[in-house]
Amino acid sequence: MKEVARAAGVSHQTVSRYLRFEGAGLKEATRERVAAAVEELGYRPDPIARSMRTRRTGRLAVLLPGVGASGPGRTLVGAVAAARAAGYAAEVLSVGGGARERAERLAELAGSGQVEGVLSLAPTALGAAPPPPGEAAVVVSADYDDRMRGIGAPADGAPVADLVAGLAAGGHRRFLHVAGDQGFASARGRRRAYLEIVERLGLESHGVADGDWSAESGRAAVRDLPEGSGVTAVIAGNDVVAAGAVRGALERGWSVPGDISVTGWDDDPVAAYLSPALTTVAVDLERVGARAMERLIAAVHGREAEEPCEPLTRVVWRESTGPAPRVRRGGE
Amino acid sequence: MKEVARAAGVSHQTVSRYLRFEGAGLKEATRERVAAAVEELGYRPDPIARSMRTRRTGRLAVLLPGVGASGPGRTLVGAVAAARAAGYAAEVLSVGGGARERAERLAELAGSGQVEGVLSLAPTALGAAPPPPGEAAVVVSADYDDRMRGIGAPADGAPVADLVAGLAAGGHRRFLHVAGDQGFASARGRRRAYLEIVERLGLESHGVADGDWSAESGRAAVRDLPEGSGVTAVIAGNDVVAAGAVRGALERGWSVPGDISVTGWDDDPVAAYLSPALTTVAVDLERVGARAMERLIAAVHGREAEEPCEPLTRVVWRESTGPAPRVRRGGE
DNA sequence: GTTAACCTAGTGATCGTTCACAAAAGCCGT
DNA sequence: ACGGCTTTTGTGAACGATCACTAGGTTAAC
């Protein structure tokens, strides 16, 4: 602050006033000089020092129930708990809008000195500069990183293979994958694993339907299946998509799993209570969140994170999958 | 800190050392004197001043996708956004365990001076002392408070009445309510509203099944319905419970809504894609969270919150409800 | 033309803690 | 009993902002 004051040829107090009241109560000329100096030096006030003097933290806490959430909630719960275990407070921000907007907020945050690290549970378009310039905070991206290290490989690849292999053992030959939002690493991972395993087992894929994690995307994918496509099994990006796919099948008069099998992902609390109960992949989302946070903390400390490789997922076979139907063209 | 030093007859630096290294490198006698003084004065170090000197914040950020969550996630997103809009940072902690444990953490937090307010999205057993002693932080409890002011009345009472009234218009006479965890104000509110409307319209209630928001509680409630109970409509605490109730009905060979109607609550992303699609109450959870946060902020500022009374809920009629079955005893 | 009133800018102290360095105290062998 | 060494304690400055108060410069009214 003193530097700014010197650069503007005024006292530190004047700078303080400029910052507090946005220039109100300053002569036009002075204000401009200060503004210029601030701009010039790229100065940003330190909120901590301010808090110290004013005794106000500008911080509110939100208490979340430890259980019962689904989706991002569960991951968040795990992440928050891990942060606390390591002596950190976790500050949450939700950012609407696109990946670009999010990347902006993230960069701003990392540079603010307010936090030591940022964990993003949402895709962020910061392709170019993975490690932000230098001093401030470390950024670790969600799910798992794209180098397929970390939680990635064990957590995401295997289950798709298990699902497809299990269905193939039931006689299924032709598959459809309804992918999730490809901005998410998990969606990309599942897609890749799907293509690989179909290839490896010599099965047929009717293709990959691009989805956005929504039930509607699942329903639409099944609705748009051409008559006689030969698809007898749908691998949905998650349980919500799977519910939509089941709905789509029923609307076409197909029975699940009689005519077509459907699999989900996440083991949503309702998955077991749908009709038919959904075959899905149970994921220990709390653990996923905790592990992501642990990686962030390791990065903040300049360490490499160790990777305990116990699996976080488990395939749960339920009623929405069954043997391939006898009649229907294709297959054997 | 200086006071502690004086009380212990040592220098402030010694106290600092005691706090930083937990007494390592201090003579036994000195350590005890300092410990006693700390205890005596109820002294707690100020993390902000510490941050100021050490340049470490002990704070990590978690970026959450703005949309797509369900359950507590959506409410959280709204709350966080409202906090930010008011210039606050929202710190999230999830607390497992019971309501008592949570109340403890909450009190600790409120007294720590770390935050200016605490918003609990989970039930907390702090019956006795609603406004915590004095100086530090303000606590506002979740959902809506029990004085039925605030978000409560418009958000929770009305829809149950609409649901029951709508079903009654379809000929339903005998109802069952599967309540949510009674620790939650929202569960209590729905329960109360249910009993009121049944009474008011002169209908019959088979009773209220105590649940815990789980699908299993819904399934169990329907499974345990005695043969010939006359119940033709189930008001479930939320969509998850409703899904369980539907499942339970199907398992008994009942058709939904042919033999029994079921309603949910929350308009979960999958609700519209179940079979039958679930009649439910769409709730603007982001708004609920935002409003709770606004009330907290108003309290922090010592103001009363204004209550914009636009409704946050809307009944969505879908396939899981229909006219009462003709045959079956009871009713008319 | 003087004085009061107001607006703007500057000076030094202060918030509560840790850092860097210096001083005192204890332990040892000779 | 006295240097040298290690362990324990004390002193003052510093972190980066705001607060309380004071000084100078304008404006306005008498």
Image (cartoon, coloured by chain):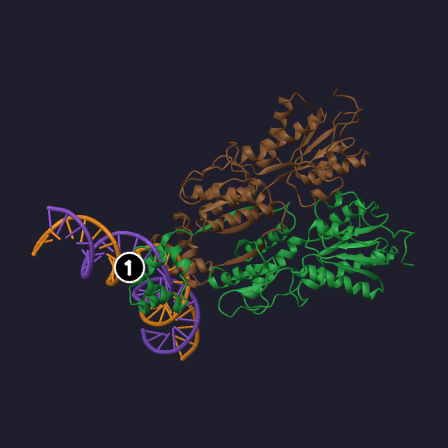
Chain colours: A green, B brown, C orange, D purple
Q: Which chain carries label 1?
A: A
Residue B291 seen in the figure:
yes
Relative to A157, say whether B135 is above or below: above
Residue A163 in the image, given as x and y percentages of width and height:
79, 56
Q: In this view, does A127 lie to the left or right of B6?
A: right
Residue A288 in the image, given as x and y percentages of width and height:
65, 57
Dividing the picture into quarters, in which one does residue A206 lie? bottom right
How many numbered marks does the figure carry? 1
Residue A136 in the image, given as x and y percentages of width and height:
49, 66
Q: In which quarter of the image is the N terminus of chain A?
A: bottom left
Relative to A196, say whether B129 is above or below: above
The residue depicted at 48 percent of the width and 50 percent of the height is: B85
Element type at marker 1?
loop
Amino acid marked by disc 1: Lys
The residue depicted at 50 percent of the width and 44 percent of the height is: B293
Q: In which quarter of the image is the C terminus of chain A?
A: bottom right
Q: Which of B146 and B102 is in front in this view?
A: B146
Q: Is residue C11 left or right of residue B169?
A: left
The residue depicted at 81 percent of the width and 34 percent of the height is: B252
Q: Nearer the viewer, residue B274 or B8?
A: B274
Residue B96 seen in the figure:
no
Residue A28 in the image, given as x and y percentages of width and height:
30, 60
Dividing the picture into quarters, in which one does residue B277 lie? top right
Q: Is residue A233 left or right of residue A129?
A: right
Judging by the rendered image, the residue that carries numbered circle 1 is A27
Q: Is residue B61 left or right of residue B207?
A: left
Relative to A275, say whether A17 is above or below: below
Q: Characterize the local packing of mark 1: few (<14), some (14-19) or many (20 or more) Cα atoms within 10 angstroms.
A: few
